[in-house]
Amino acid sequence: HQAGSTARELLRFVKKHDRFVRKAMEASVSPTTLTILLELLTSDIQHVLRNVEPELTEAQVEGQATFFTGGLLSILFRCLQSGQPIDEEEFIGIVSEFLFPA
């Protein structure tokens, strides 16, 4: 699914640029940077939701995508702040579980 690949790309970026991301978090990420990141993730998740759950209204798609995006970023930031390593497969599993519950 596209959301899984987006989440994987985000996680790889965070891991590759760990020092930068930590400094940005400490300095309070600029609103522009955060807005771009949120828009990219939200857009990808909206695309997935439209394809997987075509019965959803546009308002539902936007609301769910926004909710999921906030949750994903929160998980990443908490892991970075705590110093816990982020397991890529586990993170992708969390994303998939939220977007595609059994």
Image (cartoon, rainbow, N blue to C red):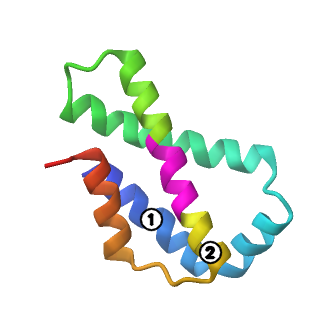
Residue 74 placed where, x, y %? 57, 56
Which residue position is annotated with label 1?
Answer: 9
Q: What's the amino acid at mark 1?
A: Glu
> Mark 2: which amino acid?
Leu
Number of numbered labels in the structure image: 2
Residue 15 position in % (x across, y down) = 55, 78
Q: Which residue is mark 2?
A: 80
Tell me if 53 is positioned left or right of 18 in this view. left
Magenta-tinted stretch:
68-75
Residue 32 magenta-highlighted? no
Instruction: Look at 55% across and 83% down and name the residue there.
Output: 84
Q: CA distance from mark 1 to mark 2?
A: 16 Å
Q: Residue furthest right?
A: 27
Residue 34: give x, y in percent of width and height: 69, 48
Residue 72 lies in the magenta-colored region: yes
**Left or right relative to 70: residue 5:** left
Give the residue furthest to the left. Answer: 102
